[in-house]
Amino acid sequence: MGFVLVGGRIQKFKVPKEDGPIKAEPLAFNAELNLDGAAERAYLFDHVWRQTQAKLYTTDMGGVDWAYYRQVYERQLPYVSNDTDFAELLSEMLGELNVSHTGSGYTGHAPNADATAQLGAFYDSAYTGAGLKVAEVIEGSPLEMGPTPHVAAGMVIEKIDGVAIAPGAEVDSLLNQKAGKRVLLSVFDPAKGQRFEQVVKPIGTGAQNELLYQRWVKRERALVDKLSGGRIGYVHVRGMDDKSYRHTYSELLGRDSGKEAVIVDTRFNGGGNLHDELATLLSGKRYLQFVPRGQELGWEPTGKWTKPSLVLISESNYSDAHLFPWTYHHLGIGKLVGMPVAGTGTAVWWETLQDPDLYFGIPEVGFRDAQGNYMEKALIQPDVQVANDPARIVRGQDQQLEAGVQELLKGLPKH
């Protein structure tokens, strides 16, 4: 008799005496596990403590008495009864190291948890009547899909799947678990005095956030174009990864190739590993010009940005989004505009624990400059410091972006 694991299930089969087909059939199997949660958490606590001591990027633990903090937090273990609290306990202990890229988390969640779907619109908060008055339909929204008429700004969504929306009523429950499903909207168009129905498929919060991100980038690009009279380009580096690099390369040498300068926006970037590639891309120096029969067609190198640039930074830059502006400024490529960036320049190692719903992180690789200074805790100060006013942001202004445009215009020829 033989046994094999196929598709996560055990199959049994008889080994034939001679060459011939092998017939397998499922093997019924049942087992129970009695788990001592407290004992498992005690083991995992010890594992995390030892791994951190062995892998932290500096052997002196940053001057922290790591053995002492083990005692402080270990005595709380008897009072922890679930993984959510256990992850918080580990995070508090790891936080005593005062370093970036560390902490613990619990990824488990209840099945069929609430998940409010989105229609892809902004609503008029000043409207007090029945229904939802649409202030703006986000580009790419489900409201733009399907046959006309479509829901548009100024219209009122009176019902969702036949349920009337009373003045001030919540609507999340009407869209709960509805992402990707057909939903019937009953709409009133006050401009025409007409009512109609539209069937849509709402999207998840993540999908709507993507639409909002693309909306923000387009607005920032349009603002730069307006403020510079079309002379300066704009690109947002979303992450420090291959996809972001390809996007940045495409924007710089495609859409922005005819611009006289470019703003490279790294705000809200959570990191990755791209600082050297980006710095290299932006550090091009012209050395040969293409001139067929007197026509000036461009310069070598063709695969790098050779014109002026400027990098926007803010408190939201993290990890490699700290290392990149440091590298950019250190190499003298251009100026930094925005707000100071906390030193978080390390490389992290995340580990999934024995309980796969738990994980923790250790900053395992440090970066030092030629003088021996670690990038961790190395504060970056911008050349031009500008704090955005939230009241102006909601009006569609971006003071940091405006300052970046003005700084670049100073160095361009007068038109």
Image (cartoon, grey):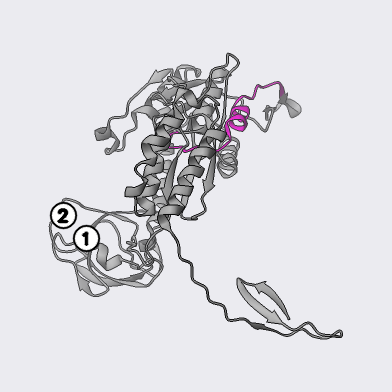
302 on left or right of 55:
right
Question: Does residue 161 lie above or below 337 as drawn?
Answer: below
Amino acid marked by disc 2 = Tyr
Whether the magenta-drawn stretch holds residue 22 is answered as no
Instruction: Give the residue pinned by disc 2.
Output: 127
Pinpoint residue 186: horizontal percent, then vertical percent: 25, 71
Considering depth in this image, is 242 or 77 the residue closer to the camera? 77
Q: Circles 1 and 2: CB distance less than 8 Å?
A: yes
State the mark number for residue 23.
none
Identify the residue at image location x=14%, y=65%.
166
Considering depth in this image, is 299 or 9 the residue closer to the camera? 9
Pinpoint residue 268: horizontal percent, then vertical percent: 42, 37
State the mark number for residue 132.
1
Neighbour tally class for label 2: few under 14, some 14-19, many 20 plus, Cα within 10 Å: some
Neighbour tally class for label 1: few under 14, some 14-19, many 20 plus, Cα within 10 Å: many
Identify the residue at image location x=45%, y=17%.
410
- Span shown in magenta: 267-288
